[in-house]
Structures are given as C-alpha cells and as structure tokens.
Image: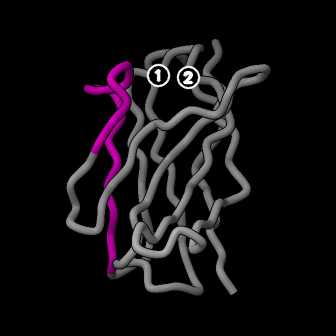
Amino acid sequence: QVHLVESGGGLVQPGGSLRLSCAASGFTFSRYFMYWYRQAADKERELVALIRTTGTTHHADSLKGRFTISRDNAKNTVYLQMNSLKPEDTAVYYCRARDIRTPEYDYWGQGTQVTVSS
C-alpha cells in the first residue's frame, strides 16, 4: 500500500525557514518523479517544485532562490527547504509521486499546513 506522509509544517514568522519532508513507502521511490504542490485558501493548487529520477529539479519561477527541493533515495524521502518565508506562502503543501512511464501510478499525500504570520 502506497503512503506519502508529509511533515514539518507549522507556524513561522515572516523571514523564517521551514523544511518539509515527505516520507514514501509502498513503491520504488527512486523510479518516481517527486513533486511539491501547494494550495492556499480559495486558490488553485499550484506546482512548487519537482525533482526527477535523475536528481534534476524544476522550481516555480516565483519561488526560485527561496525554495529548494531535494531527495534522498536511501531514505525514500523528498524535502522542500523553504527560506525567507512570506505570508503569501501560507498554504497546505502536498507531496506527489508520479511514475512518468505509467501514468496511473500517481499518488498524493494528505498535505501539511504552513502558516507564515507574525
């Protein structure tokens, strides 16, 4: 059974940092592209970053320089380092795993809340 469990969210002041983790199980982690998305209240879910099986990454243009995605295949975990946080970063952050060769193998976590506020 596939599980994606996000952790590391919480309340942080503007300018602070958080590192989100997504622990995966039930599939061959190294073969999957891993993603972070976020969804703010009353907004569409948006892509934050992705990391391919090769380790190459893509970050949303608006977040480049502040957010960094990484993965540890030995730990079956993907991370999102978030620095210089702003109130507009407040959202639920979701982890996604996708096997690009087999589209039906597409899994989402339950999300972790990040709130940036003084």
Q: Which mark is on residue 89?
A: 2
Nearer the observer, 87 or 39: 39
Q: What residue lies at 61% left-to-right and 56% top-to-bottom?
A: 7
Crowd around label 1: few <14 · some 14–19 · many ≥20 (10 Å): many
Residue type, numbered disc 1 = Leu
Neighbour tally class for label 2: few under 14, some 14-19, many 20 plus, Cα within 10 Å: some
**Numbered circle sitting on residue 16:** none
Residue 14 in the image: state x and y as whole percent: 52, 15
Residue lying at 46% horizontally and 36% vertically, measured from the top left: 48
The vertical placement of 27 against 104, above or below, is: below
Range drawn in magenta: 58-73
Contact between marks 2 and 1 (CB within 8 A): the answer is yes
Q: Quadrant of residue 12?
A: top right
Residue 55 lies in the magenta stretch: no
Where disc 2 sits, the SS reads helix
Residue 111 in percent (x, y) is at 69, 50
- Label 1 secondary element: loop
* Number of residue marks: 2
In the image, taking residue 109 as reference, residue 60 lies left or right, namely left
Label 1 belongs to which residue?
85
Where residue 34 sits: x, y (%)?
Answer: 43, 60
Measure how far apart labels 2 and 1 are at the Cα level: 6 Å
Above or below, 35 against 90 in this view is: below
Magenta stretch: includes residue 70: yes
- Amino acid found under the numbered disc labelled 2: Asp
Residue at image position (37%, 19%) is 62
Vertical side of 111 occupied by 109: above or below: below
Task: Look at 38% across and 49% down and name the residue there.
Answer: 50
Please state the horizontal and vertical placement of residue 22, each as a whole percent of the image. Answer: 53, 62
Picture quarter with the N terminus: bottom right
| Foreground label between 2 and 1 | 2
